[in-house]
Amino acid sequence: MPLEIQLFEVLPKKRRVSQKVTVLMNSSESLSFKLTESLTGACKELEKTWGQLADLGDLFNNQEITNFAQTRLISYNPSTHLSSASEDVNKAMELITKKICNVIAKIEKENENIKMWIILGHCYALLSDFPNAYSSYSRVLRIDPNCKDVYFLYGIASVRLHFNFLNDARIFFNKIVSNSSLPESSDIRLRYALLCRNLGDYNKALAELESLITNPPPGLSGDDITFQIAFTHQLANRNDRARGMYNSLYQQHPDSVDIIHQYVWFLSLQNDPHSLDAAETLIEESKLDDPMLKFVMARIMMKRGDMNAAYGKYCDCIGYWSDSPLFWCGLGVLYFKNEQLQDAIVAFQRALYLKGELVEAWANLGLIFELRDNREDAIKIYNAAIGRCGENPKFTERLKNLNIPSGRRQNSNVILEINDSRYFVQVAEKIANQYIADSPYIPVEQVGLDSSKADVVDALVGHHRSLF
């Protein structure tokens, strides 16, 4: 029977509109004034946004969000009144911003003072002001491209990793990762391991991660590292190893929602009946009313061919997943398999609205028009797909087939499903991204402060919480 679903209206995203602006200037001073005015306005808007986020964190009594927003807010306006941040964070930021002002004053007199530029970069890194930290560290390289200061290398490697400049970051990490004498060596090794994994060097990543099981960074446990090792095996398609480690962690921590999420998602990608059954059992045993687990159940039911059950699960998900291209592409496949082609078209179009480079949605949309013998529109769709996604055999082969006389064409009615995590951030990946995004552990002595101030500055450091 046809599946009917009430679609919630998805508010259109703000589109980036490139406007060509012609400005008539009588002098360079006028242009400079306009640029300064624009930058000032942009900073005010950013300041306003971070201020609102800090207030929101305060409203919901989430001190972690409040403190983070306040550190970003002060980077745009050091004179901001820090009303909602904790007293410890206030003291730390006041101390660091005062140091920044002193360092800048010295740099104005000695523009090539490399030590001051390093300290300035460290100060900005502690405030999580990564753009200014990047700029300061880059100035150090312009003054001395071969700077061997260990904490400078640590700082610039961490900042470049933060901005996903992976190959650049690796160059700097390679110079310090073997230095086990540094108190921060475990943090360096974990960042380096995550960097290697992001570059696809899974063996190197595993070697570094395994060395951290008995010596994890502050705040983390050996099981946190094991969790990342399991995820690395998963990415390397060593699924038996990954499954064994996920299962072991689940047996030790059966109430961990994060472990359940990761393990269930991993099992749902395996496609074999045993894995799908295991995923369903985990979901039922958890007794969680959880949007992510509902979505996994919808995908499991569709893989089993139980369309009515899959439809019911998709209905349960729509309030949580309506902004996900993965959701809409899956729903389109469900409609297609139930021979509701017009509904499938709407779902695939919604997926493409959210993610224009979604190959499967383009291919499936074109396929529907082929099945309707609408050759002209199918060709238009495949050409548009190439324009958005680039050359792809899924499109070029179908275009070639459409140019063959209908009596000799091959049947291309194969619906494409998304069976990977391209459009879904897994728990282990999210945790790794958060770690990379946080500032490095720069000792207070490296910013020119007395060691007695360590406890004060410690309030700014992104202390990582163990999952366990």
Image (cartoon, helix red, strand yellow):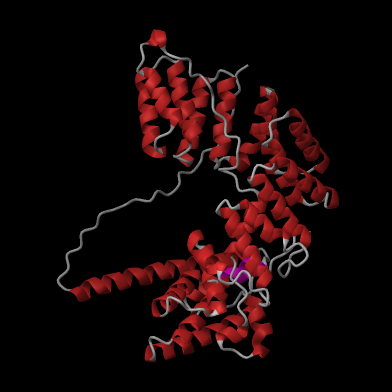
**As drawn, 237 above or below 161:** above
Q: Main secondary structure of the magenta part?
A: helix
Q: Quadrant of the C terminus?
A: bottom right
Residue 366 quadrant = top left
Whether residue 60 sits left or right of residue 333 in the image: it is right
Whether residue 30 sits left or right of residue 420 in the image: it is left
**As drawn, 383 above or below 341:** below
Residue 219 quadrant = bottom right
Count of numbered labels shown in the rendering: 0
Q: Residue at x 67, y 45 (%)?
A: 234
Instruction: Write down the region rendered in magenta.
Output: 63-69
Q: Quadrant of the N terminus?
A: top right
**As drawn, 40 above or below 238:** below
Q: Residue at x 38, y 34 (%)?
A: 386
Q: Residue at x 36, y 37 (%)?
A: 387
**As drawn, 117 above or below 419:** below
Furthest residue in direction left, as rendered:
26
Q: Is residue 356 magenta?
A: no
